[in-house]
Image (spheres, rainbow, N blue to C red):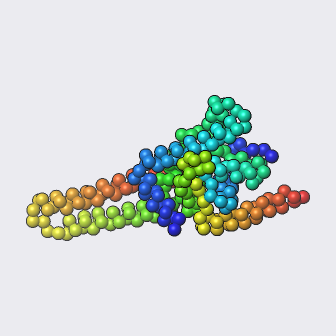
């Protein structure tokens, strides 16, 4: 159930990346604020406390980017899904090509529309292959 | 004991986060505090590294989060352990005990 929720979240994140980036930023800033308060309670001046809090947190932008990246990723291995998509598109393109070759054409426009269909499927396949990112750890 | 400057191993950090949350829902800052508290201040998590870890655990379905109001009346994201997370914690604890036992055995070998 939690994985389903995580998958829905990933889809939501992909649709609203700015909203998620703001959400992550709010969360991280809350942390720094809590640390600043603790530092003040420990006897630091507000400026010192803020500086120390930011320093102890580390690279804010890097942490934020890593959090957003994790939120964007799906909670399962998508390589099988991608492979299935590639095979489906390739099979459709092949079938369409065979259909074009084996169907008698009475007009140039019908031939062109069938060739166009094959070209669209081939482009889809190429785009899908290009979008496949290298595996990140 | 020395603080973990270079950061804990990823698996260890995950286990500590799960352990901290097994005691109740917390926001990110609270998790760091609780880990320090239950380890007797021996373990200090690199604060920034806690969050990518939390997001990773949420992606795996071991924790879930929701926004709520904190003790100081601020909006904060609270995390809690899921049932899958509780099972994972038990597994991680067993693995850790086995590894620690084997390492001690190796170190004591003459």
Q: Is residue A82 above or below residue A40?
A: below
Front in this rendered view, residue B66 or A1 = B66
Image location of residue A14, percent across then percent down: 42, 53
Query: Residue B80 sits in which quadrant?
Result: bottom right
> Which of the 4 quarters of the picture holds residue A50?
top right
Identify the residue shown where x is 84% and y is 56%: B107
Q: Nearer the viewer, residue A50 or B60?
A: A50
x, y percent for residue A39: 68, 37
User: How many marks do you count on the picture?
Assistant: 0
Rendering quarter of residue A45? top right
Q: Please say if A66 is above or below A111.
A: above
Residue visible at 56% across and 51% down?
A: B69
* Place of residue B58 in the rendered image (x, y in percent of width and height, measured from the top left): 56, 58
Residue A26: image location, x then y, percent: 52, 44
Q: Is residue B108 visible?
A: yes
Q: Nearer the viewer, residue B89 or A102?
A: B89
- Residue at x-position 76% and y-position 48%: B41
Direction from residue A64 to residue B49 in the image, left or right: right
- Confirm whether residue B57 shows in the render: no
Q: Does residue A131 appear to the left or right of B31 in the view shown?
A: left
């Amino acid at each position: 159930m939690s994985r389903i929720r995580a998958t829905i979240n990933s889809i939501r994140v992909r649709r609203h990346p700015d909203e998620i980036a703001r959400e992550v930023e709010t969360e991280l800033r809350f942390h720094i604020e809590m640390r600043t308060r603790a530092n003040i309670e420990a006897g630091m001046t507000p400026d010192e406390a803020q500086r120390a809090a930011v320093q102890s947190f580390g690279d804010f932008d890097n942490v934020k980017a890593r959090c957003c990246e994790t939120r964007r990723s799906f909670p399962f291995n998508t390589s099988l899904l991608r492979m299935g998509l590639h095979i489906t598109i390739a099979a459709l393109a092949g079938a369409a090509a065979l259909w074009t070759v084996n169907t008698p054409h009475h007009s140039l426009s019908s031939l062109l529309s069938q060739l166009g269909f094959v070209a669209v499927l081939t482009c889809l396949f190429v785009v899908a292959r290009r979008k496949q990112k290298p595996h990140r750890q | 004991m020395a603080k973990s400057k270079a950061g804990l191993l990823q698996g260890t950090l995950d286990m500590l986060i799960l352990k901290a949350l097994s005691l109740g829902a917390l926001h990110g800052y609270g998790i760091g505090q609780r880990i320090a508290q239950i380890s007797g201040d021996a373990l200090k998590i690199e604060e920034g590294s806690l969050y990518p870890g939390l997001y990773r655990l949420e992606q795996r379905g071991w924790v879930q989060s929701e926004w709520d109001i904190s003790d100081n009346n601020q909006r904060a994201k609270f995390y809690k352990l899921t049932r899958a997370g509780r099972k994972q914690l038990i597994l991680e604890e067993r693995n850790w005990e086995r590894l620690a036992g084997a390492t001690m055995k190796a170190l004591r070998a003459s």
